[in-house]
Image (tube, rainbow, N blue to C red):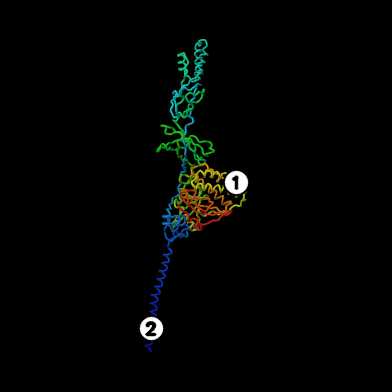
Amino acid sequence: MKTNKSTIIIALATLLFGLLIGWFVFGGSTEESHEGHDHAEEVAGEAETWTCSMHPQIRQPEPGDCPICGMDLIPLDDEQDEDTDPMAVKMSKTAMQLASIRTEKVKATEPVKTLRLNGKVETDERRIASQSSHIPGRIEELMVSFTGEFVQKGQVIASVYSPDLVTAQEELFEAEKIKDSQPQLFNAAKEKLKNWKLTESQIEQILQSGKPEELFDIQADISGYVTSRNVNVGDYISRGQAIYKMADLSRVWVLFDVYEQDMPWVKKGDKISFSVASVPGETFEGRISFLDPVIDPKTRVAKARVEVANSGLKLKPEMFASGTVEASFPAKAGNISVPKTAVMWTGKRSLVYVKAETETGVNFMMREVTLGPALGDSYLVESGLDEGEEIAVSGTFSIDAAAQLAGKSSMMTPPESKTMETPQAFREQITAVANAYFEVKNALVNDDAGTAQKAAGKVSGALENVEMNLLEGDAHHHWMALQKQLEDASKMISETADIEKQREHFNTLSEAMLETTESFGLEIDRTYRQFCPMAFDDEGAFWLSESDEVLNPYFGDMMLRCGEVKQTYRKGQRIFKTAENQNTQSAGHNH
C-alpha cells in the first residue's frame, strides 16, 4: 500500500514538471513568434509613397519617373507632429533634396528698381538750321553737292546770279557821284547791299572796280553737316529761301521711351547708362534733362531726353539705344523684399511658404502676402512677412503639390465664391468679350503677334458695348473694377508687336477674364480654366479656354501641350474638379 502511494506521488511530480517545461518552451516560442510578426508589420509600415511634384495625383510605392511629365518622383511624408499646425506641410530632408527646395531668411533691403528703357539717337533740335539765300536770283554753282558733307562756317557754298543785285550796284555807282552833296543817298545805297549780306569789304571792292558784279557767293552761316539739299543748279530762288538744311552733331539727344506704368519712377536728373549696337563694349552715360509732359496717344509712352557729347561722331541719328536707370523708392523702416521665385501668384493671391523647424523635422506653412513694386528679380513686400523669417525660394511648387496631396490649403485651392445674379443680356455682352479674348488666346497659341494685336482691339470694342447700367450694387462695382483691368490689358496687347510682352499682358487679361467668368457666368455651355506651371520662369499662369484641349498661349509651338485643365465652368455656374479628377484630362500634358 505504501509502495503504491509513493509511486503515485512520483508520477504526479513528473507530470507537473513536464507541464512546466512545456510552458516555458512553447509559451516562449509563441511570444517570440508574435514579436517577429509585429516587427515585420512595422518594417512594412515604413514603406514610402512616391509622388510627382507637378502631378500630385500620381502615387507609386517606389521611386521612378512621373508617367505624365517624366520628372523624378519625390517621397511623400504623411507623418504630422502633434505640436505642428495641422495645415503645415512636413518635408523630410530627402524630399527637400530631391525637390531642390532652397530657403532664405527675409532681410531688410534698400528699395532700388532697375528700369530697362529703349530709345533712339536724335539730332539736337536746337542745333538744326536752314542755310538760306540772302539774294534773289538764279543758282549758277553749288559748292556742296550732296547730303552728309561737312560745311565750315564762312565757307562759300553757292554762287548766285542776281539781276536785282546788279541794279542795286548801279544805284550805288550813281549815288557815289553825288555823295559829297547827298551823302545820305550814298549811305542808303550801301545799306541796301548790306541788307543782302554783302560785307563792307565786298562793297569797297565793287566801288573800286567801277562795274557791277553779276555773280555773288553765299557763305555758310554755321558749321555742320548737310542733312538735305533743297535746290539744284539753274533753279531760281527768292530771298530767304532755304538752300540747305544743316545740323551740328557735336552734341545729340538720346530719346528713351518711358511706359505709363514706369513714369512714377523716372524723374528729371536720374542717371542713365546706355549702349548702342554699333559701338560694342562701350557704355555711355548721361542724365535725364527733360521728360515729356504728355503721353503720345498712339504709343502710350513719354520721352525721356538725355543730352550727350558726341566726340568722334560715334552716335549717329536714328541709332537704337538700350539703357538702364536706377529708380530709388522712398526709404522707410522695415522695407523687405523676397525673390520672385519664392512667390506663387494665383492672380488674386500672392503666396509664400514659411519654414519652421521642430524636434521632429521641418515643415512649411503657406502664407498670403501683399506685394509692392518689382525690383528686378525680387518684389517688395508690403505686409505678410517679418524680417528674419525663413521662406522657400525654390521648389515652392513641390511643397504646394505635397499640400494638395495631403488635402491641405494650397495655391490650387480655389477661394469660395458664388456666381452673381446678373441679367441674361449682360451675360451675352460679356460672352462677346470672351469670344474676342479667345481670338487673342488662339493667336498667341499660333505665335502670331499681328493677329493678337487685332484681336485685342476686338476685346476693347466688345467692352465698349457692355452696358454697365444693367448691374446694380456690388455686381456693378465689381464689374467696374474688372472692366478697367480688361481694358488696360487688351490695350497694352494691341499696342505692342513684341509677342513676349503680349504674353505678359495676356496673363493679366486672363486673370480678369477668369474672374469675370466666375463672378457673372457666360452664355457658353462649357469653358475651361487651364494652367501651365512652367510659365514665367516656373511661376505658373492660368488662362480661359473654349476647349478642353490644352493649347498653351504662353509658349506657343515651343511647348504647345504644357498645361492641364483645372476647372470646368458651365453656363451660369462653376464646377470644381480636384487634381484626382483631372487624371484623364492631364494625360496629354507634355513638357
Mark yes or no: residue 176 visible: yes
> Given the image, on which type of amino acid does mark 1 rest?
Val
> Given the image, on which type of amino acid does mark 2 rest?
Ala
Residue 217 position (above or below residue 79): above
Residue 404 position (above or below residue 259): below
Tag 2 secondary structure? helix
In the picture, the quarter occupied by the N terminus is bottom left
Residue 335 position (above or below residue 356): above
Between marks 2 and 1 in the image, the one whose residue lies nearer the viewer: 1
Of the numbered discs 2 and 1, the one sitting upstream in the chain is 2
Mark yes or no: residue 478 visible: no
Q: Residue 8's spot in the image, x, y percent?
A: 39, 85
Query: Do the residues under discs 2 and 1 have CB atoms within 8 angstroms?
Result: no
Classify residue 24 as left or right of residue 177: left
Dot 2, crowdedness within 10 Å: few (<14), some or many (≥20)?
Answer: few
Task: Kindly identify which numbered label has been placed on residue 420.
Answer: none
Tag 1 secondary structure? loop
Q: Nearer the viewer, residue 229 or 567?
A: 229
Q: Residue 377's spot in the image, x, y percent?
A: 45, 46
Q: Residue 391's spot in the image, x, y percent?
A: 46, 51
Dot 1, crowdedness within 10 Å: few (<14), some or many (≥20)?
Answer: some
Q: Residue 275's spot in the image, x, y percent?
A: 43, 38
Query: Which quadrant of the structure image shows residue 251?
Result: top left
Q: Which residue is mark 2?
A: 11
Q: Residue at x 60, y 49 (%)?
A: 428
Q: Which residue is mark 1?
A: 466
Q: Nearer the viewer, residue 427 or 265?
A: 427
Per the model, the C-alpha gap separating discs 2 and 1 is 108 Å
Residue 470 position (above or below residue 43): above
Q: Nearer the viewer, residue 184 or 76?
A: 184
